[in-house]
Amino acid sequence: MSRPEEETADPAGLARRVRALEDGEALRALMIRGWRALDRKDWETWIACWTEDAVLEFGPWDRIRGREAIRATVAKAEAPYPSMQHHILNMHFDIDGDLATGIGYMWFVAVTTPGGTSTPYAMGGPYDWNFHRTPNGWRLARQRLGVLWTSGEDPLKTFE
């Protein structure tokens, strides 16, 4: 096993470690940029985070294939909510060249009544991701999201 000072002296090893750090940060930035766009219902920014042939697997829905089908389904589902917050927690990525996998946790909070101050609807569960490096940077190729818990009432029943 090499010592840290030996790895630092090896330019190729140092370059690999820097690349891994940069890739991990690029993946985090991709997810944060995309999910903040969801909160603003900025569908162009959000869907640009996905590959053309992406797949979305979400507990209460059937598997959705293709970027435009994903966009249409999610935009329709989230349109009735006056405001939302998509939190991505405990993200971790494993990178292998131009492919990466990732895990994290979702905590979704939605206001169900315009101007309402009552308890919001919330849900949470695990994310499981696959990413591809493209000429335009990292993009999400597959997302599986499970719902482990919900809180509050959702009169809109969008995610059933």
Image (tube, grey):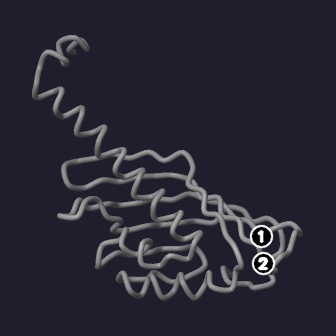
Q: Position of residue 62 (x, y in %)?
A: 51, 83
Q: Which circle's residue, 2 or 1, is located before the other in the chain?
A: 2
Q: Amino acid at mark 1?
A: Tyr
Q: Which residue is under mark 1?
A: 121
> Residue visible at 47% across and 67% down?
144
Quadrant of the image for the N terminus? Answer: top left
Quadrant of the image for the C terminus? Answer: bottom right
Q: Is residue 60 left or right of residue 109?
A: left
Q: Secondary structure at mark 2?
A: loop
Q: Please say if 39 is above or below 43.
A: above
Q: Position of residue 14 (x, y in %)?
A: 18, 26
Q: Position of residue 110 (x, y in %)?
A: 72, 70
> Residue visible at 19% across and 49% down?
97
Q: Secondary structure at mark 1?
A: strand
Q: Please say if 131 is above or below 25.
A: below
Q: Please say if 124 is above or below 96.
A: below
Q: Which residue is under mark 2?
A: 112
> Residue visible at 29% across and 59% down?
138
Labels 2 & 1 near each other (Cβ < 8 A): yes
Q: Amino acid at mark 2?
A: Thr
Task: Give the number of marks.
Answer: 2
Q: Residues within 10 Å of mark 2 (few under 14, many from 20)?
A: many
* Marking on residue 65: none
Q: Is residue 66 left or right of residue 160?
A: left
| Residue situated in front as seen by the camera: 141 or 81 | 81
Residue furthest to the right: 118
| Residue situated in front as seen by the camera: 85 or 104 | 85
Give the Cα separation between the discs numbered 2 and 1. Answer: 7 Å
Q: Please say if 159 is above or below 4.
A: below
